[in-house]
Amino acid sequence: MPEPAAFAAGQRVRVRAADPDGHTRAPRYVRGHTGRVVESQGRWPLADDRATGAAEPRVETVYTVAFPARELWGEGTHEVTVDLWESYLEQAAEERA
């Protein structure tokens, strides 16, 4: 049975600021930034594992996360949405207990 999603729609999350040696689908421009989960896209094989040729890539929940454009680019009134695997995310500081 798959694990339940760690994050819910509306929850604030922070993208881990890691800079891994290998492949990652976490864009550099969102690493370390805080956004809001828009929705879950289901569970998918982790692209990082697939890129290394892992025989059995980890399967994780993928989330659409919205970021204020102003926080990413310094201007803009719109949001930027990015699909991110669960292991790229952590609870935002203001969400931690």
Image (spheres, rainbow, N blue to C red):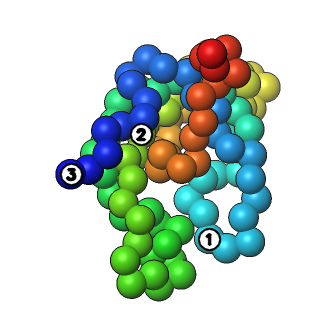
Residue 67 appearing in the image: no
Number of the front mark, 3 or 1 = 3
The disc, 3 or 1, on the residue closer to the chain's N-terminal end is: 3
Residue 80 in which image quadrant: top right
Calculate the distance from the C-alpha at mark 3 to the C-alpha at mark 1.
28 Å
Q: Give SS at disc 2.
A: strand
**Amino acid under label 2?**
Tyr
Q: Residue 33 in the image: x percent, y percent?
A: 70, 33
Q: Quadrant of residue 68?
A: top right
Q: Amino acid at mark 1?
A: His
Residue highlighted by disc 2: 63
Q: Is residue 51 visible?
A: yes
Q: Please give the name of the residue rendered at 45% of the width and 81% of the height, measured from the top-left corner.
A: 54
Residue found at x 36% / y 60% = 59
Percent across and percent down for residue 70 are 71, 22
Task: Give how far across and how far down residue 16 sits, in percent.
Answer: 68, 44
| Numbered marks: total | 3
Q: Is residue 75 left or right of residue 86?
A: right
Q: Secondary structure at mark 1?
A: loop
Query: Which one is closest to the eye, mark 2 or mark 3?
Result: 3
How many residues crowd mark 3 within 10 Å: few (<14), some (14–19), many (20+)? few
Alpha-carbon span between mark 2 and mark 3: 19 Å
Q: Earlier in the sequence, mark 2 or mark 3?
A: 3
How far is mark 1 from mark 2, CA to CA?
19 Å
* Residue 91 in the figure: left or right of residue 9: right
- Tag of residue 23: 1
Name the residue that disc number 3 marks: 1
- The three-letter code of the residue at mark 3 reads Met
